Image: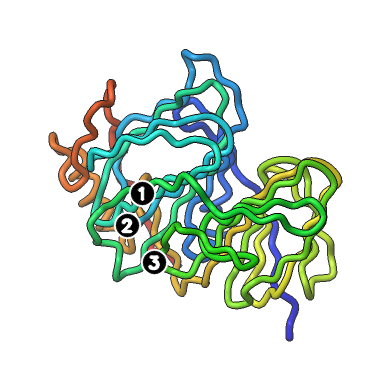
Amino acid sequence: MSAPFVERITSHVGDVGGLPIQRSLPNKARRTVGAWCFADHAGPATLPPERRMNVGPHPHTGLSTFSWMIEGEILHRDSLGSEQVLRPGQVNLMTAGHGISHSEESLSDRIHLAQLWIALPDAERERAPSFQHFPVLPRVSLDEGWDATVLVGELAGRTSPVPSFTPLLGVDLAASGPACTTLALDARFEHGVMLLEGEVEVSVAGHDAVETVAPGTLLYLGAGCESVELRCAAASRLLLLGGEPWATPPLLWWNFVGREPAEMQVWADDWASADGGRFGVVEGYVGPRLSVPPVPALKMPG
């Protein structure tokens, strides 16, 4: 058996609604890890009240947004009429399907979260939109100091209540000091180790080198990897993401996930209409919605 493919991906730095972020996916080096097609690490940051994160109403289609809160509180509103505060240890899952719009407002000065997108498969990407809140997720203590929260999928006999339309894994792993564990992986999946805090040594079964990963780096593990060892000397936190590889990556532009460039113009025109078209209206938010930028010349994914 050949050694699993391992690749280091450097995040690019940006800003969302006043909150600093590091974006690991999509990236020139790699567009997806399974159906995970977008991965932002937001914060940790302490912002003055006048600069709290505030993202006005904006549209989504063809995806699920997955928000995992580590510190702080965010108020979610959407065009279905949902209004939900997301608190530490909780997940908001918004499945856009045919189309939805939402806003996000920080209710605290301190913010630290992961915001991820999951591309919907062809059979589900036009489904009716929905919103779900998960206040409690399964937790398990692993070997020698690592604590895991199972965000989606299954780990160590614990299964998350968060649904998915494709086989997925999402786990938050945190250690308050020196820690080491070996995790068995589904060899059918590709995986990504996304550092949020601290520094972790990653030993991949069948891969000779030990990779040291810090925030701003995602370590990609190709399909065929059966286990991984995670070791840290001080407090650290990471996300382990996984899923079955997609034959053809989806096409991403602005807040949309599609398959063909022509779809993007249709969706942009819908959002630009007075009533938001398929995306509807977010009630209760005070302020303007985000304007759709001009659609550029887009290339088919490949």
Amino acid type for the residue under numbered disc 3: Phe
Distance (Cα) linking label 2 and label 1: 17 Å
Residue 165, x across and y down, in percent = 39, 66
Image quadrant containing the N terminus: bottom right
Which residue is identified by label 3? Answer: 165
> Crowding near pointer 1: few (<14 within 10 Å), some, many (20+)?
some
Residue 123 position (above or below residue 40): below
Distance (Cα) linking label 3 and label 2: 12 Å
Seen at 29% across and 70% down, the residue is 123
Residue 109, x across and y down, in percent = 54, 20
Query: Quarter-wise, where is residue 20 in the image?
Result: top right
Residue 100, x across and y down, in percent = 26, 46
**Callout 1: helix, strand or loop?**
strand
Task: Using the image as rendered, state which of residue 301 and residue 4 is in the foreground.
Answer: 4
> Crowding near pointer 3: few (<14 within 10 Å), some, many (20+)?
some
Considering only order in the chain, which callout, 3 or 1, is on the residue closer to the N terminus?
1
State which mark lies toward you, 2 or 1. 1
Which residue is identified by label 2? Answer: 62
Which residue is identified by label 1? Answer: 132
Image quadrant containing the C terminus: bottom left
**Callout 3: helix, strand or loop?**
loop
Amino acid type for the residue under numbered disc 2: Gly
Distance (Cα) linking label 1 and label 3: 14 Å
Seen at 42% across and 63% down, the residue is 164
Residue 115 position (above or below residue 146): above
Amino acid type for the residue under numbered disc 1: Gln
Query: Quarter-wise, where is residue 210 in the image?
Result: bottom right
Residue 240, x across and y down, in percent = 63, 57
